[in-house]
Amino acid sequence: QVQLVESGGGLVQPGGSLSLTCAASGSIGTINTMAWYRQAPGKQRDVVATITRGGTTNYADFVKGRFTISRDDAKKTLYLQMNSLKPEDTAVYYCNANIRRSAYDDSRPYWGQGTQVTVSS
C-alpha cells in the first residue's frame, strides 16, 4: 500500500507565499519522477511542475519564476514553494509520484488527495 499525503494549503493574499509538502509512505522501492498538478473548479487538471530522480525540474509557463519544486528522497517527500501568488493560482493542488514498489513491480503513478490553495484578498 502506498499513500501520498499533501499538506500546507490554505488562504493567502495576492503576492503572498505558501509551501506545500507531499509525504509518501508505505511499501516503496523507488520513487521516480514526482510532480505537482492543480485543478481549478470547472477546469482540467494541469501539471504545475515536475522533478526527476536526478533533480531535473520543469515548470509550466504560468508558474515559472514564482514556484520551486524540490524533493528529499531520504524523507520520501516532495515540496512546492509558491511565491508571488495570484488569484488565478487558486486550485486544488495534487501530488503525483511514479513509484516502483519492488524490483518485481512496474513503476506506476500514485496520487495524493489534494490540498486547497486559495489566493484572495
Image (cartoon, helix red, strand yellow):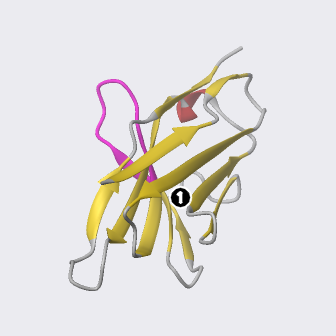
113 relative position to 59: left or right = left
Q: How many marks?
A: 1
Q: Using the image, determine if residue 83 lies above or below residue 34.
A: above
16 relative position to 100: left or right = right
Q: Using the image, determine if residue 41 lies above or below residue 35.
A: above
x 70%, y 59%: residue: 65
89 relative position to 111: left or right = right
Q: Using the image, determine if residue 37 lies above or below residue 14.
A: below
Residue 98 point in image, percent of width and height: 35, 67
Is residue 42 highlighted in magenta?
Answer: yes
Residue 45 point in image, percent of width and height: 33, 43
Asked where in the image residue 10 lies, by quadrant, the reply is top right
Can you name the residue that lies furthest to the top here?
A: 121
Q: Dot 1, how many residues are within 10 Å of its Cα: few (below 14), some (14-19), or many (20+)?
A: few
x 57%, y 73%: residue: 57
Residue 102 point in image, percent of width and height: 30, 78
x 40%, y 30%: residue: 40
| Quadrant of image for the C terminus | top right
Q: Nearer the viewer, residue 110 or 51?
A: 110
* Residue that mark 1 sits on: 61
Residues drawn in magenta: 36-47
Residue 94 point in image, percent of width and height: 43, 43
x 40%, y 55%: residue: 96
Secondary element at image label 1 = loop
Q: Using the image, determine if residue 42 lies above or below residue 30.
A: above
Q: As shown in the figure, which amino acid type bears the numbered disc 1?
A: Asp
| Quadrant of image for the N terminus | bottom left
Is residue 40 highlighted in magenta?
Answer: yes
Can you name the residue that lies furthest to the right here?
A: 16
